[in-house]
Amino acid sequence: MSALRAEARTALAIARKDAVAELRGRHATVSTLFFSAVVLLLFGFALGPDSARLAAAAPGLLWLAVVFAGLLAVTRLHLLETDDGALEQLALYPVSRRAIYAGKALGGMAVMLVLGLVVLGAVGVLFAVDVASAWLPLLTTIVLGAVGIAAVGTFYAGVTVRLRAREVMLPLLMLPVLAPLLLAAVKATAAALAGDPFGELGAWLQLLVAFDVIMVVAGAATYGYLLED
Amino acid sequence: MTDAGFVIAAYAVIIGGLGLYTVTLWRRLNSARRELDRDDEAR
Amino acid sequence: MKTRILGFAALAAVAAMTAIALFVVPADLNQGDAQRIMYPHVASAWLGYLSFGVTAISGILWLWKRDLRFDAIAVSGAEIGVMFTAFAIWGGMMWGRPIWGVFWQWEDPRLTTTALLLALYVGYLLFRRLTDDPQRRATRAAIVGIVAAVDIPIVHFSVEWWRGLHQTATIASPDRVLNPAAPMIFVGTLLGMLGAFTLAWGYLMIRRYQLARAELAREEAVRIGRLEDARRGVARSEAAR
């Protein structure tokens, strides 16, 4: 039992380390948020000006913006390691690989959560969607989506971080895997905003939970192989 | 295009593609084996 | 030698089944001649999925046994899988245009899942090319392949739900030929085509595996060659001193 607690402590320590580094730098968080805002603006230009069409498309646009900004965010978190060989040092510690993965994913999750909330608010404003009335299911969806994107993103960022052509490789590998998360999150968001007329919200949230669980397990199980090389 | 056109397009690409892949695979295999033989002789 | 026999058998079978599918089997009552596309389309799709299963399992076996032959199997499965999956999508599009009126639509869960499958394994193949060290490459490819394989059932499930919740008029289904009530001659032709394609698959897998082994041997030889050059260079500079 204490072994598990030690792992948890390690994971939190890593997450805290990342958070401190991130807060000190702060460029990445701000630029990522700004990037998502720009993406939303571009969506407005591309699909507007019909506000009815934009409001209908809002759930999809929300999650597309979150996913794209998420690509930047997870790359950022792993770059923190490679810039001074910290990843190799991390691998040398007698720490469980799962704990390292969990720590990095936790950091990613925190970033994605902030991102999701900010984008949710921006979408509410830009596309005239009432996000306040359905705040609980929307918040749940954002949390579940954040976990999934962080889990998958941490994994693939680790996989591509030392490769050439990684700027292209990360999205290319990560985005297809995220397709079911995107689908479920968008459907859940749309259902929540509409007041769940068909009672499908629960089903989509369950799919998100299943996705999250599977991906966290897969990521944790295989992350160790990444660090060994 | 009539239905026949689509059928032909489908089969041409699939069966033709199989053949094309097979032929290129042969060439890649022969080329790789030749390089190995050359290495063995050089040594 | 046995492989060559397999190759000839595959060639004969594919040629025969193509002739049967195009000229012998009758056209479908509802879908007409376009239904003939289903035979190679379905066969390609199944072999695409089979290939990727082989890739995923070989990846796991590599991680477990550390035998590079498993990685050779994995890359063979991925390359051949990409080919068959591309065929399946092409067949689906050629069927879709006359039947649905469009080359693509989002309601069919298998079409969208298969497209994603293609994306995942093209990514896998591109990803492999970025690492030169065979062991590292095998390990990285294995974990990417495993996560990709794990994603596929999730994708399929979610797209099924997506289609199910969408209230639209019924769209003609591509797999009437798989329907248990379908006439025997259709089912027989499909199974025959599947068998012929599987023979071809087996032959191509063997040849691609041989290619992978040869390339591994070449890489090894190049590395040894460089080591010897380096050693000779060191010896020369020592002698010069």
Image: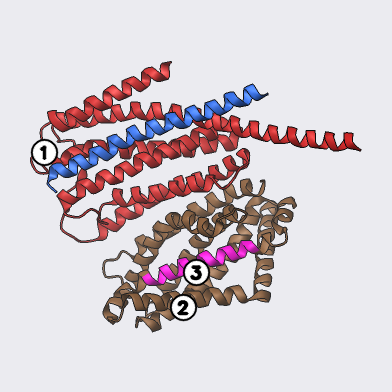
Chain colours: A brown, B blue, C red
Magenta span covers which residues?
A: A61-79
User: In the image shown, does A133 or A113 lie closer to the viewer?
Assistant: A113
Total numbered labels placed on residues in the image: 3
- Locate residue A37, reporting x and y percent: 46, 78
Residue beneath label 2, please? A37
Dots 2 and 1 on the same chain: no
Give the residue type that dot 3 points to: Ala
Residue at the outermost top position: C1
Magenta stretch, main secondary structure class: helix
Q: How far apart are marks 3 and 1 (CA)?
A: 49 Å
Give the answer, above or below, for where A91 lies relative to C13: below
Residue beneath label 3, please? A69
Q: Determine the secondary structure under disc 1.
A: loop
Displayed quadrant of residue A209: bottom left
Residue beneath label 1, please? C28
Quadrant in the picture for the C terminus of chain C: top right
Residue at mark 2: chain = A
Residue at mark 1: chain = C
Give the answer, above or below, for where A146 lies relative to C171: below
Residue at mark 3: chain = A
Displayed quadrant of residue A197: bottom left
